[in-house]
Image: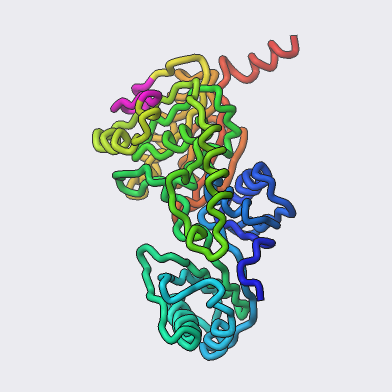
Amino acid sequence: MKIIDYNEIIVKTFSGLEDILAKELNNLGAKDIQILNRAVKFKGTKELVYLSNLHLRTALRVLLPINQFDVYNEKDLYNKIKKIEWESILSPELTFAIDSSINSSPFNHSNYVALKAKDAIVDRLRDKYGKRPNIDTENPDIVINIHIFKNECTVSLDSSGFSLHKRGLRQAQIDAPLNEVLAAGMILLTDWDKKSDFYDLMCGSGTLTSEAFLIASNTPPNLNSKFSFMKWIDFDSLLWENIKNKALENILSPDIRFFTSDISQKAIAVTKLNMRVAEMRKKVKIIQKDFFDTMPQGNTGLIILNPPYGKRLQLDENIEFYKKIGNKLKFDYSGFTCWVLSGNPEAIKYIGLKPKKKINLLNGKIECKYNKFDMYYGSIKDIKSKTEN
């Protein structure tokens, strides 16, 4: 039985980013792309697995299903996991870990499923080699993903080995930092042309700015990462080096400006610390300033705002806050495009502007609205009148 089969590949993502991920995969050359819930499936090759891990900005993990079967109890799970030819993937010299997700009445705890699967794998390899591989939950060589939905169990190899949001840039953070994959997805959803200036005016840990810089410079998000597929028996080091070298050749210096600010002194200190790439430090202007005191540095640009959600504030306080945001945008940022991510679906209605687009996203477990506002010079009525004349 051929264990490592690259024909079917599943890439996990966040809810609301599936379409963007599908576009990214299409740009890499993926075929037969199917959009799933928080995932995208496609027909692939070994090269596409390598490319996906390196280049995808909205991917969390790149999985290769190796077996699928129905399970009804723990003994059934153990026996069917043990039948898989793990010696084609694992040797006693390699460490492994199991990542499991469960939505099934026969199995209540993902940790218990992982434990039974681990026992089955270890027992098979002990029978084969007379010794067993070790478990390493921190830095395993091989990561195995087990997903059970109702009675259907899918066993996959995790080619990434870690969540791909870990770019290796963040050195520090403030409370509830924006996930890098979500930040990249938010930017890609704007259809930013990478030619207009980028404004992150409630920057927090600076994640939006970091991701925007990576996008504008064509820098792969996981350029310096070590992936699990590098430990696979069929790893093609020459292919991987060629892919990385080509990616390095395509990196460029953005010919735009990045403006980043926050009212919090701590946020600014953290953002500066996280701008590790030397080119970032040259291109990104970081200042401590209240959003309501900022002014545009040009006639147009892309603004992305991720205001504090203010769960401890009363609704009327949030309403006033969003009214102030709307007024600031209308009076000082005419000619700009602004996207606002809000975990306050009621309060954002009071921003006083008609959204051109509304997208539902999840920030952790918080349901958010991601709204687009075009800031026109003058009123829309004036613009229509000029166009008609």
User: Is 5 drawn above or below residue 369 in the view shown?
Assistant: below
Is 389 included in the stretch rendered in magenta?
A: no
Segment colored magenta: 282-294
Q: Quadrant of the N terminus?
A: bottom right
Residue 79, picture quadrant: bottom right
Q: Which residue is drawn at 33% across and 38% down?
A: 274
Q: Which of 376 and 283 is in front in this view?
A: 283
Percent position of residue 291, x then y: 36, 28
Q: Which residue is drawn at 54% across and 30% down?
A: 353
Q: Which residue lies furthest to the top in this view?
A: 389
Is 288 included in the stretch rendered in magenta?
A: yes
Does residue 107 appear left or right of residue 383 in this picture?
A: left
Q: Quadrant of the C terminus?
A: top right
Q: Residue at x 35, y 44 (%)?
A: 170
Does residue 123 appear left or right of residue 355 in this picture?
A: left
Q: Which residue is drawn at 65% across and 72% down?
A: 2
Q: Nearer the viewer, residue 134 or 201?
A: 134
Percent position of residue 351, x then y: 48, 33
Residue 344 visible in the snapshot: no
